[in-house]
């Protein structure tokens, strides 16, 4: 049974699912949809055209669906969509999309956002992603499935992060991070593969070894980078994981590629 505290304000037009709990002093706008089994602890603010998936828990002072922090936003009916089974801790903020950026900010299922983390306008966040405290995305970022972003880290707008990446705490990420990698540092650089994360996802030892050989070919062998990419594509053409990395590199557009300090840049 849905329970709404007497101090909460739920606007006419909002759609509230079954077995939802809305705690004290929550404010829900008229274009909000809250899925079955969600729990809003207290002092939660949800505005705009925002949809929250089933069984998502939202903690005090979270603010979702507010206008994008963009000078190009023109007040349109853009959207924020949050998936199922997410956990949004205290003071998490997520903005609507912009008209010029596709019109939607999207967050996947089973994501864990720790206190004060932020998802900016037009970002697309995959499933099973973890943001530690104060992790921040600039606008238009793309975050793959299973990514972990360390506390106090910030990603430049338009940055892409491939699946199963680990970004260390207090990192400033200005370039695209290939799938399965570990990145760290004030001006983040690649630090190899996210081996711990890969093992947790049940990657076989042989599969990790192939990825290591491909990483060596791409970033540490001599020669021009573009040539090394094509060499790796030919050498590892039958390996799905390596080709996922190759495709990610080839699809880069807005940001440079994050590379290791030891990369040969000939």
Image (cartoon, helix red, strand yellow):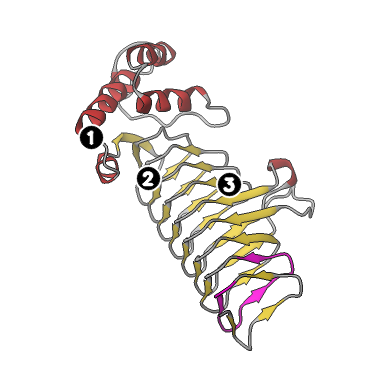
The residue tagged with tag 3: helix, strand or loop?
A: loop
Which residue is identified by label 1? 204
Name the residue located 79 percent from the left edge and 55 percent from the top edge.
75
Name the residue located 46 percent from the left edge and 67 percent from the top edge.
89
Separation of residues labelled 2 and 3 (CA atoms): 17 Å
Q: Is residue 117 above or below residue 200?
A: below
Q: Is residue 156 above or below residue 245?
A: below
Q: Report which quarter residue 44 is drawn in.
A: bottom right
Q: Which mark sits nearer the N-terminus, 1 or 2?
A: 2
From which residue to which does the magenta span run? Answer: 18-34
Is 49 placed left or right of 82 in the picture?
right
Q: Report which quarter residue 23 is drawn in.
A: bottom right
Which residue is identified by label 3? 123
Q: Which mark sits nearer the N-terminus, 2 or 3?
A: 3
The residue tagged with tag 1: helix, strand or loop?
A: loop
Q: Nearer the viewer, mark 1 or mark 2?
A: 1
Mark 1 is surrounded, within 10 Å at the Cα level, by few (under 14), some (14 to 19) or many (20 or more) other residues, namely: few
Separation of residues labelled 1 and 2 (CA atoms): 22 Å
Which residue is identified by label 2? 167
Is 185 placed left or right of 25 in the picture?
left
Q: Report which quarter residue 232 is drawn in.
A: top left
Name the residue located 38 percent from the left edge and 18 percent from the top edge.
265
């Amino acid at each position: 049974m849905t329970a709404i505290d007497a101090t909460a304000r739920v606007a006419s037009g909002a759609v509230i699912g079954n077995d939802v709990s809305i705690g004290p002093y929550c404010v829900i706008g008229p274009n909000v949809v809250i899925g079955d089994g969600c729990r809003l602890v207290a002092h939660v603010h949800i505005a705009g055209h925002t949809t929250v998936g089933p069984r998502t828990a939202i903690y005090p002072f979270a603010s979702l669906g507010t206008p994008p922090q963009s000078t190009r936003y023109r007040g349109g009916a853009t959207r924020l969509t949050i998936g199922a089974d997410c956990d949004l801790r205290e003071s998490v903020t997520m903005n609507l999309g912009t008209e010029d950026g596709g019109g939607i900010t999207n967050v996947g299922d089973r994501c864990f956002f720790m206190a004060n983390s932020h998802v900016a306008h037009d970002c697309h966040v995959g499933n099973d992603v973890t943001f530690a405290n104060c992790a921040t995305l600039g606008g238009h970022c793309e975050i793959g499935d299973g990514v972990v972003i360390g506390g106090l880290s910030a990603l430049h707008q338009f940055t892409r992060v491939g699946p199963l990446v680990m970004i260390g705490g207090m990192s400033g990420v200005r370039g695209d991070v290939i799938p399965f990698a570990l990145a760290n540092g004030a001006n983040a650089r690649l630090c190899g593969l996210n081996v711990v994360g890969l093992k947790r996802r049940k990657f076989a030892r042989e599969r990790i070894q192939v990825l290591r050989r491909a990483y060596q070919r791409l970033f540490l062998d001599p020669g021009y980078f573009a040539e090394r990419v094509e060499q790796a594509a030919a050498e590892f053409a039958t390996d799905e994981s390596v080709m996922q990395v190759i495709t990610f590199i080839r699809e880069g557009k807005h940001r440079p590629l994050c590379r290791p300090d030891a990369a040969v840049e000939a």
